[in-house]
Image (cartoon, helix red, strand yellow):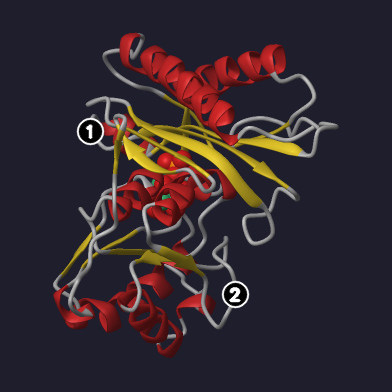
Amino acid sequence: AGVDVETLRELARRLALEAGALVREQSPERVVVAATKSSEVDPVTAMDRASEELLRARIAAERPDDAILGEEGDDVPGTSGLTWVLDPIDGTVNYLYGVASFAVSVAVVAGPPDPARWTALAGCVHSVVDGRTWTAASGGGAERDGRPVRAGSPASLATSLVGTGFGYSPARRAGQARVLTQVLPRVRDIRRLGAAAIDLCLVGEGALDLYYERGLNPWDLAAGALVATEAGAVVTGLRGAPAGTAMTVAGPAPVQGDLVRLLEDAGADTVEETFTD
Ligand code: IPD
């Protein structure tokens, strides 16, 4: 049976809005870190878990044959060939500190659960505090709050505003800081807003010209990369590789290509350094 990407887009939107309402309305006055993951600065809160549980329950009820890949739980196998890729709170550190840039990200993809090999079908990024909601469907364009969005058209890398982000491991961060010394002098300015899913959507509406990050997880980029692509941006990795966990670079051509070359020259896809306090 054919897959109707617009139906999937609408479901992704409905799920993201419902989880967003939970996060917004039931946030405790002080957020407590429930655990840490990859390192001591990589937090998970009770709300990350509650939001993901809600999303998983809805998908199990409405799309029982689809697989689920989520940040905070075990992978659920499926039989339909479709996988829901969930980030219950992207920008958890912002959530923890009360900084407004965090989102629920819901995407549905076909093929293997690997951003370098899957085909994204539909997705939604819902910014929890202010309600901005970006959606995209493969071949169906990108929207914010129901209105089409387009990536910007920066004249050059030198005049581009560039978003980026950093991983949680000290060794990777040491390398990312070194790469930044190559990028920052060559662009208009850098933003580190703290939620990759929102950053990618901002590229899709031209509020950021470009965005790059090494080490994103599949759930950080699944929905946002589709929004950026459907908005006319190019989203790739380095050295001819597709966008993925090694590197994601998003922005309109040809300036996206200029950033790719700069990052290649800086060795941004192999940045891990030994780092000791
Ligand atoms: C993180 C955010 C951050 C990015 C990190 C991600 P999380 O996701 O998207 O902006 O720099 O690489 O891990 O942990 O808040 O879901």
The three-letter amino acid code for the residue at tag 2 is: Ala
- Judge from the rendering whether residue 109 lies leftward or rightward of residue 54; answer left or right: right
Q: Inspect this view and state whether residue 239 appears.
A: yes
Nearest the eye: 182 or 127: 127
Dot 1: within a 10 Å radius of its alpha carbon, few (fewer than 14), some, or many (20 or more) residues? some
Percent across and percent down for residue 185 are 18, 82
- Check disc 2 and report the residue beneath it: 241
Per the image, label 2 sits on a secondary structure element best described as loop
Q: Position of residue 61 (x, y in %)?
A: 70, 11
Q: Quadrant of residue 23?
A: top left
- Local secondary structure at mark 1: loop
Where 166 sits versus 53, above or below?
below
Q: Residue at x 56, y 15 (%)?
A: 54
Q: Which amino acid type is shown beneath numbered disc 1?
A: Ala
Q: Is residue 125 above or below residue 260?
A: above
Q: Give whichever of 170, 225 is nearer the camera.
A: 225
Above or below: residue 10 compared with residue 154: above
Question: Where does residue 239 sit, x and y in percent of width and height?
Answer: 55, 83
Q: Earlier in the sequence, mark 1 or mark 2?
A: 1
Residue under circle 1?
A: 100
